[in-house]
Image (tube, rainbow, N blue to C red):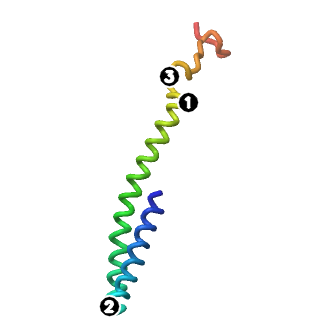
Amino acid sequence: MIRRTTASLGLLGFAIAIFAGLFNGHSYEVIITRALSAMAILAGVGMVVGYCADHVVREYRTKQYLEIFGHPETPENSVNVSSENSSTPTPS
């Protein structure tokens, strides 16, 4: 999710800067320079946004999983193994 958001926002910034430069009649050097700058800046923003979104989604998935299946250390999900049922001999 982080890489997709980074790439999407970076390419979006690049495209908007290209079209804005062409629409306003700037030279090609200025357009490319501004487009690359916009791509780098928005890729950084996209990385931060993607990281935050990934963290939120992971937290939500973990919460939903624990609500459905319970916590692994809860008594209803734990396996009770006593030494009487074990096949290994105990030292005397």
Q: Earlier in the sequence, mark 3 or mark 1?
A: 1
Q: Amino acid at mark 2?
A: His
Helix or strand or loop: what does disc 3 sit on?
loop
Residue at label 3? 74
Q: Amino acid at mark 1?
A: Phe
Q: Name which residue lies at 65% across and 16% down.
A: 88
Depth check: give the residue in front, 3 or 91: 3
**Is the residue 54 above or below the residue 33 in the image?**
above
In the image, farthest residue toward the front: 23
Measured as percent of width and height from the top left, residue 35 is found at 36, 80
Residue at label 1? 69
Measured as percent of width and height from the top left, residue 64 is found at 50, 36
Pointers 3 and 1 in contact (CB under 8 A)? no
Q: Amino acid at mark 3?
A: Thr
Given this view, does label 3 or label 2 mark the residue nearer the observer? 2
Depth check: give the residue in front, 25 or 64: 25
Depth check: give the residue in front, 90 or 70: 70
Determine the CA span between mark 3 and mark 1: 10 Å
Q: Name which residue lies at 58% across and 6% down.
A: 92
Quarter-wise, where is residue 46 in the image?
Answer: bottom left
Q: Name which residue lies at 50% across and 28% down.
A: 71
Determine the CA span between mark 1 and mark 2: 60 Å
Classify 10 Å Cα crowding around label 3: few (below 14), some (14-19), many (20 and above).
Answer: few
**Is the residue 75 above or below the residue 16 in the image?**
above
Q: Name which residue lies at 36% across and 79% down.
A: 17
Residue at label 2? 26
Helix or strand or loop: what does disc 2 sit on?
loop
**Is the residue 47 above or below the residue 13 in the image?**
above
Measured as percent of width and height from the top left, residue 19 is found at 39, 83
Q: Is residue 31 left or right of residue 79?
A: left
Given this view, does label 3 or label 1 mark the residue nearer the observer? 1
Quarter-wise, where is residue 15 in the image?
Answer: bottom left
